[in-house]
Amino acid sequence: MEFKHFSHIHGLVFHQTPQGSEIHCSGCKSPGSSGNVYVCWKCNYFLHEQCFRATRSLRHPSHHLHPLTLVPYPTYPSTSFFCNSCNLVGYGFCYCCSECEFDVHVHCAHMLTNVSITHPNTSVAVQNFPMANEQTHNFANPQPQNHLYPPVQNNTFPYYVSS
């Protein structure tokens, strides 16, 4: 059975890669290990399951002003983007707000976790975006000590915490 995806001209088929094999996702441009992928065998085009299933538009707590749109490649002349979540450069799929020049890797957009920070004088609720491992750009194993904390309420600047 073939599936249509906006990022590729041909139909894609579901494929489960064998244990220990590695693919390079044509969408997010990141390596991936064994698991579910969607493939065009004619073009050697591979998509991680998460990239294949990514919605074309989403509202994200890190950017309240506008919805973010999934684009198949960066829209900047440099053909790359700077992820506002992990602070790393990206070359493939990204959620973007072209009005604000706000961009987030597909994987970063889905790594959201909630945390609460309590202080004797106040209680602050924030969203936690784990940073990607900079050496390998491995989104499956983010570094737990680096986080970007965009404020949930009326503040205007994100908080960066590194331990």
Image (cartoon, grey):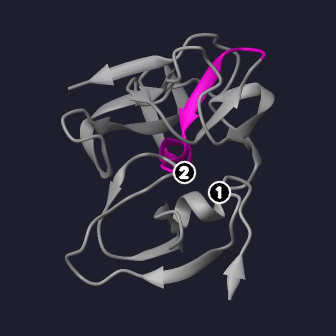
Nearer to me, 26 or 81? 26
Nearer to me, 103 or 149? 103
Identify which residue is drawn at 71% across, 62% down. 5
Circles 1 and 2: CB atoms closer than 8 Å: yes
Task: Name the secondary structure under disc 1.
Answer: loop
The kind of residue tagged 1 is Ala
Q: Is residue 31 magenta?
A: no
Determine crowd level at label 2: few under 14, some 14-19, many 20+ residues with C-alpha closer than 10 A: few
Q: What is the number of the mark on residue 110?
A: 2
Q: Is residue 105 magenta?
A: yes
Counting residues from the start of the chain, the first of labels 1 and 2 encountered is 1
Q: What is the number of the mark on residue 54?
A: 1
The kind of residue tagged 2 is His
Identify which residue is drawn at 29% across, 67% down. 33
Q: Position of residue 99 (x, y in %)?
A: 78, 16
Q: CA distance from mark 1 to mark 2?
A: 9 Å
Q: In the current view of this chain or complex, which residue is farthest to the front? A: 42
Task: Tell me: residue 118, above or below residue 109.
Answer: above
Q: In the current view of this chain or complex, which residue is farthest to the top? A: 156
- Image quadrant where residue 63 sits: top right
Task: Tell me: residue 154, above or below residue 111.
Answer: above
